[in-house]
Image: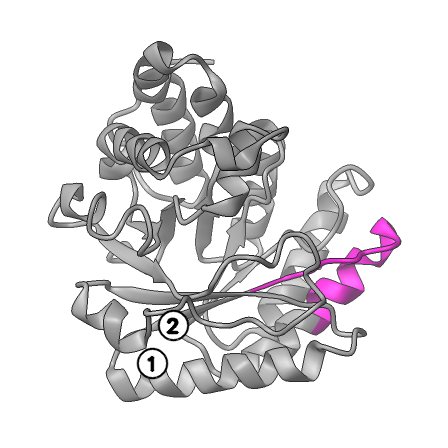
Amino acid sequence: MSQDGRFAVLALDHRDSLRRFLDPDDPQRVSGAELTEIKRILVEGVGGLATGVMLEPEYSIPQVSDLLPPTVGFFAALEAQGYLADPGAQATSLLEGWSVEGAVASGAAVAKLLLPYHPDRPLAREQRAVAAAVVADCQWAGIPIVLEPLFYDLGDPADRSRVVLSTAEHFAALDPDLLKLPFPVDPGLVADRADRLAACHEVSSRCAMPWALLSGGGSFGSFLEQVEAAAEAGCAGFMVGRALWGDAVLAPADQRRELIETRVRARMASLRVAIGLPAIGLISGP
């Protein structure tokens, strides 16, 4: 977080999803060493432009966290993997051998919990109970907690606003330190800026704590527009993953570093400007 309460967070806590992104046909062919190397070069190239970096204990804590500048803290993901195939099958659990206390001991500045969530599905109450227990554990341990309730099974894109607003209300009631939320309308369906602003204001009105916008893997141009609208409507910042660096890591390995140091840095600088931070280290690029 910046001194004025803005969040420009580089999200690198992907594990199963990054394997699938890199090799959709055979995700398990992607080694842990490759995941770590990708995260390392992203931190080396872009970490200095972030106010924080989101990591996980399997491939990046401490392998990547040790590379962060002293002024950039890291968020430690708590959740186990395995939710991608059927997000509504079971409640979120913590990674085996990992805990809130482990996150504190690792030097994390913040803990983070992702919870697949739909307010109308049978698992909703159990997911809120899981989140409430983790919030209590973090309060006891003295570490801030970010909750990331991520919708799934959205049958009608036009229903997105209702689902996101209801979700924001449910999880804000648990009193986390920060909420990480999707854009409240489908950017492919709602192009009018006034409608986008109104929806983001609705999210802000339901959150007594700051909220940050997640990128959700869409295009960078679309995400930048979303950040601009959300920031104007009271959002405290962004947590960006593949929309920022996805095309760079899909490039041949010998081209990744140059793309990260040019294109990805320029994008991160643009996002900083969108939330009112200076575009330090701006390098021009597509």
Q: Is residue 224 visible?
A: no
Magenta range is: 149-166
Task: Verify whether residue 226 appears in magenta.
Answer: no
Q: Of the residues under marks 2 and 1, which one precedes in the sequence?
A: 1
Task: Verify whether residue 150 appears in magenta.
Answer: yes
Q: Is residue 69 above or below residue 202?
A: above
Q: For mark 2, give the secondary structure.
A: strand
Q: Is residue 156 above or below residue 25?
A: below
- Nearest the camera: 24 or 238? 24
Q: Is residue 22 visible?
A: yes
- Say which residue appears at 33% left-offset and 74% top-offset: 99
Residue lying at the far left of the rendered structure: 70
- Distance, label 2 to label 1, CA atoms, is 6 Å
Q: For mark 1, give the secondary structure.
A: helix
* Left or right of 21 on screen, residue 65: left
For residue 283, the mark is none
- Nearest the camera: 121 or 187? 121
Q: Position of residue 202 (x, y in %)?
A: 68, 66
Pointer 1 local density, CA inside 10 Å: few below 14, some 14–19, many at least 20: many
Tag 2 and tag 1, C-beta contact below 8 Å: yes
User: For mark 2, what is the residue?
Assistant: 145
For residue 138, the mark is 1
- Say which residue appears at 33% left-offset and 52% top-offset: 58
Pointer 2 local density, CA inside 10 Å: few below 14, some 14–19, many at least 20: many
- Nearest the camera: 168 or 54? 54
Colour style of the rendered protein structure: one colour
Q: Position of residue 128 (x, y in %)?
A: 60, 81
